[in-house]
Amino acid sequence: MGLLRTLLSKSITDTTGWCEDCAQLVPAQIVEHSGAIWLRRQCPVHGQHDAKQSKHPKHFRLMESMLEPLPPPILEHDIAHAKHLRGLFIDVTESCNMRCPNCLIDAKGMVSGKMPSLDETIEQLKAILPYKPVLYLTGGEPTLLSDLPKWISRLTGLGYDVKLLSNGIKLKDFDYVKMLYNSGCRWVLLQTDTMDDESLYALRGVKNTSEIRQQAIDNLVRVGMNIDLACMVDSNFNMTDMGQLIRMGFDTPGVRHVSLMPSRRLGRGLLTTDDNLLDEIEMIAAIDEQTSGRIKYRDWVMFFAAMHAIHRLTNDPDFATRRCFLPLPLLGDSKSFHPATRVSGFLKNPRNLRAFMKMASRGGRAEAASWSERSLLISIETFREPQSIDVQDAARCSRYYLVDGKVQMACHRNVIDRPLKRAEREKKLGRPAKPVRLPAGVLLKGDGRVTVEG
Ligand SMILES: [Zn+2]
């Protein structure tokens, strides 16, 4: 059977994968067989294993034809190519006040590397000067860091754009939000997912949080913050709410971006099984349906093609296409929005396109003001799991982590390093690092369906 599959496979490209058995990087290929695309890993010790990349070969090959060539690798210490680096995540705390059953990093004890002090961070950032990537402060929940406002004012004072990733609990306090704004924070990536309490409980493990989220949004709007609604999308719960989130984005002043990320078996990954893994194509189809056909598959492909063309002309990393990130700018209002790809003026004026992407990726600078219509970026960002991570493709991403004074590819850190760290800890403890379970009343059935009881 294995031999037959090997004979029937069509190879698409060579790359590098990860063997979960021996935790080594191994040669891999992207291949097509059995109606799907697979990452075939060849471990010299543990043999050949296939992991699904896409259920839609035709779509995969179309996007593959528009990918940028691989950039020069940024190795852990090698900063010679740091101009490719546009965003840098910094874990500022490992404390958290949510209990997400799908926590990407399985917070406490899993934020590998030492928590850097502010002074250490500033010292480490000097190594990549003159490049000043956008700094994403994350963790854990960064608002639990008592001197967060001090971090923000020092970093913005040095000329960095700072974006805060938050679950919103602390942001229900208006005075706190005001303090963050006054310290120089202009952009918050707010965990939103959905505004349905029952689904939020299943996804985040805490009851009745929709009101808190709404209060956080109101406070952010009141001070004039730019907002990115960050949504983990799960096929059992909030997949049906994406259209509503997009309309809410248009209706809320300051919302610049609705970021949709399908849930994955990373970290705890308790909600996600083989059966409910979402593919980007399924999300695209659902968005089409939930927006009454306003956003079509061809719009996503057209914008991807436009980015590819602009990157070839400008070599600007903001436009580099990669497999896991599908962006699409929308214009209009919540009742009559349309993809910017349908407006001839958008593609005719690359300066506007550039301004828009800058706005989306750089903390909402003034370029945005040149738009005559309300604009909103939506994106689908598909994380890989350990067995299906294409390590070379991950290098196309311009976002990295700062860990112990080194820059590290974001996906490599989340998908490979954190599970390794966990395994290490478990070995040392002689037991699971931390017992994890679904929130009370949330049930995982044999067929991969997850439900909330009573
Ligand atoms: Zn192996």
Image (cartoon, helix red, strand yellow):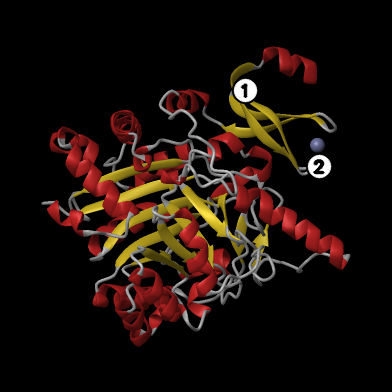
Q: Residue furthest top?
A: 7
Name the residue tied to disc 1. Answer: 31
Looking at the image, which residue is at 48% across and 51% down? 261
Q: Is residue 339 visible?
A: no
Front residue of this view, candidates 133 and 388: 133
Identify the residue at image location x=19%, y=54%: 367
Label 1 or label 2, whichever lies nearer to me, is: 2
Residue 364 is left or right of residue 343, and the answer is right
Q: Quadrant of the image for the C terminus?
A: bottom right
Please give the residue where the numbered disc 2 appears in the rendered image: 21
Choose top left, top right, bottom left or bottom right for residue 158.
bottom left
Relative height, residue 132 to residue 111 (above, below): above
| Residue 131 in picture, x, y percent from top left | 40, 52
**Given the image, on which type of amino acid does mark 1 rest?**
Val
Query: Residue at 72% of width from left, 67% of height from top?
Result: 436
Give coordinates of residue 351: x percent, y percent: 18, 41
The secondary structure type at the circle numbered 1 is strand
Within the displayed image, which quadrant is ligand 1 positioned in? top right
Q: Is residue 149 left or right of residue 74?
A: left
Mark pair 1, 2: CA separation: 21 Å
Q: In terms of sequence position, does the residue under pointer 1 or pointer 2 come before the other?
A: 2
Q: Quadrant of the N terminus?
A: top right
